[in-house]
Every structure is written in C-alpha cells, then in structure tokens.
Image (cartoon, rainbow, N blue to C red):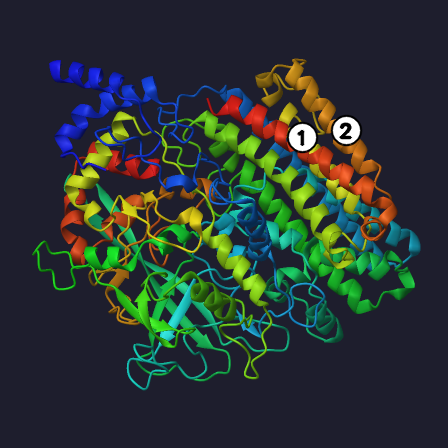
Amino acid sequence: MRRALLMMGALLLWTPGCGEDAPGAPAAPPRAGGATTIDDRTSLAFAQPAPNLSPEGQALHRVGDGAFAAVFVPAPAPVNPGLGPVYNNTSCNGCHLRNGRGMPVMGPGPQRTQLLVRVSLPDGTPEHPNGAVPVPGFGFQVQDQANYGVRPEAAVTVEWVETQGRYADGTPYSLRTPRVSISPKDGASLPERMLTSLRLPPPVFGLGLLEAVDVSTLRALADPDDRNGDGISGRMNEVWDVAARALAPGRFGWKANSPHLTQQSAEAYVNDMGVTNPLFPEADGTHELSRDTLEAAVFYSQSLGVPARTALDDAEVKRGEALFQTLGCEQCHRESLETGAYPVAEMAHQRIHPYTDLLLHDLGPGLADGRPDGAATGAEWRTPALWGLGLTQTVLPYATYLHDGRALTLEEAILWHGGEAETAREGFRVLSAEDRAAVVEFLGSL
Amino acid sequence: MPRFSLPLRLMLAPVLVSGALTLGACNDEDCCSVPQDTVDAAIISTFADQVVVPTYQDLATSLTTLDSAARALQADPSQERLTAAKTAWFAARIPWEESESFLFGPVDSYGFDPALDSWPVNRTDLDAVLASNDPLTAEYVRNLQETQKGFHTVEYLLFGDGGTKQVGDFTTRQFEYLTAITLEMKTISTSLSDAWTKGFDGRPPYRDTLANAGQSGNTAYPSTQAAAQEMVGGIINILDEVANGKIADPYDAKDPNLVESQFAYNSLSDFSNNLDSVLHVYRGFGDTVATAQHSLRTLVGANSALDTRIISELDAAQDALARIPEPFRESIRDPASADEIEAAQAAIRKLQTTFESEVLPLVTR
C-alpha cells in the first residue's frame, strides 16, 4: 500500500510526454500500431487509412483502395481488363474480405475460391536457388477458375476429417483436418508425390509496419540452432527476390515465402488473378497492370491503420494475458517490436505490438504440409501476427483460423500447435475451463 | 520500454491505469476502459428489426418480382412487358442501394454482395456464352463469373448500351440467359434474407448476433457501443463512397465507363437511395414502419440542435443530388454541370463530417 502511494506521488509529479518511453515514466497503454493506430472495433476496422498519413499518402492510399477493390474482367474491356486466362478470384478484396482473411472455400460462386492450393514436386530442377520445383500443367498454384473457353487447370474440393481429443479436465473437443482432392480438367493424372499446401488469405492491415522492422532485429530474435536450449528455434526464410535476382530474407506469406510486399502483391496479381504486371510480365515484356496501379495497391497494404486493443483493463483479459505469457505463447507471438528506417516515413521508427517474431518455427506433424517453401521446411510456419485477432468475427462472421482455415475457433487454433509450440499447447490443454476462457478473452481483446 | 516482471506489473497495473486516467492528455492514448454497455441495446435491436431485416426482405421480394417479370417477357415478348421488366429492375435496385450503409455480416461472408452487384460487366465472356449453345443449367450459371451475373448484367441485357433496347432487339438466347440469372438473384436474395432471420448454412440468424450485442460470448459485437459504432461507421463509409468514389471516380476521369448503373441511367437514383440508407439507419426505420422508439436519432436527441442539423444536411445532400442534370454519365463531361456535381459532393461530405465528428463520439464514450 505504501509503495502504491509512493508510486502515485511519483505519478502526480510526472508530466507525461506522449511517447511511450519517457524516461522513468510508467508505460503508457500500448498502441498496437504505434502512430498508425486507429480506435475502431467495427467490421471496417481493417479498412481505415493510418491516421498519420501525409496528404500525399492519403491520396495514394485512396487510389490503392480503388485498386484493391477493382474487379478484373477478361480483355478486351474498357475497365479493369486482364483477368485470367486461369485464376482463383477476380479482385484483391475477393479473397481479403473487408481487408481481413478469406473464407475456407473453393469452387464456384457466390463464395468464389478463396482457399488456394500451392503445389510443387519434391525433386527436380528449381527455377532459381531455394525455389520450388514446378508441377507440369500447374506451376506452383492450382488455378481452378477460367475465362470462357479456357479450361481451368483442375477442379479442387476439400473435405474435412474430424479427430477427437480431450482437455485435461475431460472436456471433449473435435479438430478437423483438410483432405484435398485435385481433378485435372484435361483428364491427366496427377504427378506422383506432388506436394500440396492449402493457404487461406490472411488479413492485410499493418503490413507496412511489419515490412519496416529491420532485418537485423529479426536476425537478433532468430535462434536457428536453439543455442539457448529453450526448445524454440526461430529461423529466417531465404527466398528468391525477383526484382533483385538474388536470395533475400523472406517475411510475408504463411511460410515467409515472399521477401517484400511489392513481390507479394505482384505474385497475387499474376497467380491469383492472372493479371500480368511489371514484376511478372507477359513473354514479350508487356503487362496488363500498370506500374502505378501495382505501386498504389502495395502502398494501400502498407498504409492501413491498425486497430487498437480493447478492454485493456478488464480483469479477465489481464488474467488471460498473464496466462499467455506464462504458457510461453509470447516466445514466438512476440508482443512488441520496433520498426526501423522505412521509405514510408509514417511507418518508420514505431513501437508496435503485433504478437509475432516474423520467424519460421516447426509446429510439428499435425500442422505440417510437407511442402518446403524457400528455406522453410514442410513443418515450419511463420508466426502470424495476432493484432486485430479479436475483430475476426466482426469483420468476417464465420471466419476460421490457421493457414488453411481448419480451426473453427481460437481454442482449436491453439490446440493445433505442436512441435516447438507443444509445451505451450499442452499448457493450454491442461488449464481449467475458466483459465482457457481467459486466454481466449485476451485474444479477443487484440 | 522497461519490462517489469509479471507480478510487479500486475501489482502496478491499477496504479498505472489510474495514472493514465489522471494525467492522460495525449491525443493518442488508448481507449482502455472496459467496454460498458453505454448504448441502449434497444437501439441495436431496433436497427436490426426495423431497418436491416425489412430491407433484405424487400430485396428478396423485389428480386422475385424481377424474375417473374423477366419470365413473363420471355414467355410472350412485348414492349409493354419489357417496360414492366425494366420497372421491376428499378424497383429491385432501391432496397439494394438502401442496404449499402450496412454491408457487413452474411452479405460479405457468403459472397452475396459480389453475386448481386459486381461491376464492371464482363461483356467478353457474356457475349461468348450468348453465342454458344451451352445449356444454362443452375450449376453452369453458378460457375459463371459474378461479372456476368447480378444487377448490372441484367441491366445491360434489359436496357442495352445507351439504354435504347427495344423488345425486337432480343434474341431467344438472351431471354434464356436473362431468366437464368434473375432466378439466381432471387435465390441469393432469399438466402441473404434468411441468413438474417432464420439462419443460413446451419448458422444462427445474424439478426440475433447483432441485436444481442454486448451479451456474453458475442465475439462479433462484445458491447452495444461496438454495434452502434458499426451503424455509424457504415453511414460514414457509404457517404464517403458516394462523394469520393461513385461520383468522384467517373467525374475526375471524365469517363462514362466508370459510372455505376450506366445502361439504365440510374446512377443518380442509386446515390439518392444510398442517402436514404443513411436516413433509415439514423432514424431506426426503413419503408415498412414509420416510427422508432430507440434509434441513433433518439440517442442524439430528436429535435435537438444536432438532430435538426443532421436532418437538414441530409435534405440538402438530396437536393444537391437532384440538381445534377440527368443523365449522370453525360453530366460528368459537361462543364455546365461541374458546379452542380461538386456542390453535391460538398453537401455529402459535410454530412459525413457531421457523423464523424458529432455522432461517432456519442457512441464511443
């Protein structure tokens, strides 16, 4: 009590600045996205510009907003030509609904394919160092949609197989695993030992901040050989940078398989929508998407606001947060990172709270897709950011979790963790129902 | 930032919070209080029951009518029946545009929005399908791109380029295609309405999710404020979209190809119905009933200075839209219409600012 009174006295003498690091000051409440944070807990929370954008930034963001919503149609067309000939979906927002995640669906409309199948061969000659080996007739992704008169590569269906489990207190749960069936449209048989990996579209806000984290920061967090013996490695992927024509640290995508947002966006245009662009042009060097539009779309993904946490002083949330720490979740879902120098000044030098280390971790055989991607093994996944997680059902009712959407609830998502996260997962499994609820309550506050 | 050990942090937490409350004068401080349900839950349930649900029921009814009108036209083509089908299209467009200030929930999750309202029209593939003899089975239609279906494709088929289509211009195949896609729209709008009232695909009715905001276990709307912010956010979003997207994009580019509803010359009606959507959410009732005990308007205070201003700014925005000369797709390129177009944008932006700066704070307390 006396200590508290003393602290109060100190507080009253302290004139706070608005930074989080005023010397000797207590920590201000964390702002998820630093100066890019917005106070919005609605279905549009992932669709607001960062509040600190310059007038020029606001203008470019608006152009990017249009680019993100633009629905492509087959050429020739006066507006948005260039779709296909084969594709998965027709716009950025067709998969990233309200800039959030996609639904775990594939096939025809109205819920057009949002869940993608990446494919490769286990051996053969890759196109470039650390690259995957393409599958004849598919490349690296199955495009199951096509313009009129063109045959899609395959029909893809997914079935879910349930397995039963129990919490330590006896409460039963059921987890579902996807079973993918690919039927080539030309009647060909699939190559033997073809590797497949399902990918759910992830949310697109806050990406500029994650891009602005200096690579040296990530290297410092990495522990590829687990020298500290805590059972957690953390590795950086090394992937092919198309523009630089060299290997580069991977950061974006479920396996950190893309080096930066420009390539990530260009890959989405060419693979998901069949729209050629400056990074992935036609054979003759021309492209359907202008450089300006690509840059605007990239900037849009870099310059969205990050929603602030809610219920910060709710007792249940705090208890859940403490459990999140003691279970060890925070060892990979790192609460806090600093951004460094960055071309978009609004994202540079911020203290952010994304709950990720952006590193690859082995999550065990249960989640493994068995498909290496760059330097990532078939069991490794890049820690996804958890900021905004509590808004998932607001932005997209019935949304699901994990890389392939297999988890119907946050509890299921936790229960799927294995490998390096085995201890944390097991810690959660043996918690009381009240404590499990508190952890989920905390995740809901993000 | 100093990292306290856990017990110390927990011990300090109340102190830190009280410090923040005592001293926090930073503009960017987190709104870190526990969400209390400071917004009357009846405002949310009234919005769900008197605005969202009736609007979607109206949409389902009017798309059923459109499908019937298209079938009547196909069965016995006449200029009169073509006019009736066009009238049915205009009528169905109204509830859709009136729903655009609340495009959250099942309409997005299930892909109903793109299925009904994709744009631009994929004329390349549409012409190819019309030229083919492919049987237009339900499965075949389901596989067609959304840009070959929905409101704007029906519009293109009924009105034609330039809006001058006569009944004699139709081919048998066009009638066949038209009724195939009006049937799908009818089905989708029924599913959308059901998703709110009965539940769809084995899910509970979304009406309950929204109306039960703040109740335990509600992961979409953990507080009534969150739902009220959804309402106000949707209003702000559609006002922004009309002024700075639907009007600005074609006007700034002077490109009629960027105009929504360009075949039926219905764009200005669309915009006006979007403003009605705002009015409905604000007052807590749509076209079916004529009063609301609990609404954003009662929260603001009916007939208060702010309420009077909101209503007059809404009226001013409607008046300004009405002063833009028809057809909009021509006006955007006519220097003589520039003042009217820009005045309408300014009026809509003014209303948007009022909702942002005066109404939103009332539901974020």
- Above or below for B142 versus A100: below
- Above or below for B227 versus A14: below
Q: Residue at x 82, y 41 (%)?
A: B339
Q: Residue at x 59, y 21 (%)?
A: B295
Q: Quadrant of the N terminus of chain B?
A: top left
Judging by the rendered image, the residue that carries numbered circle 2 is B316
Report in which chain the residue with disc 1 lies: B
Q: Nearer the viewer, residue A265 or A412?
A: A265
**In the rendering, at what x and y percent does residue B292 appear?**
64, 19
Q: Residues within 10 Å of mark 1 (few under 14, many from 20)?
A: many
Q: Nearer the viewer, residue B287 or A82?
A: A82
Query: Tag 2, which secondary structure?
Result: helix
CA distance separating discs 1 and 2: 9 Å
**Is there any visible trace of residue B149 in the rendered image?**
yes
Judge left or right: residue A364 versus residue A114. Answer: left
**In the rendering, at what x and y percent does residue A226 appear?**
11, 60
* Residue lying at the far bottom of the rendered structure: A125
Judging by the rendered image, the residue that carries numbered circle 1 is B351
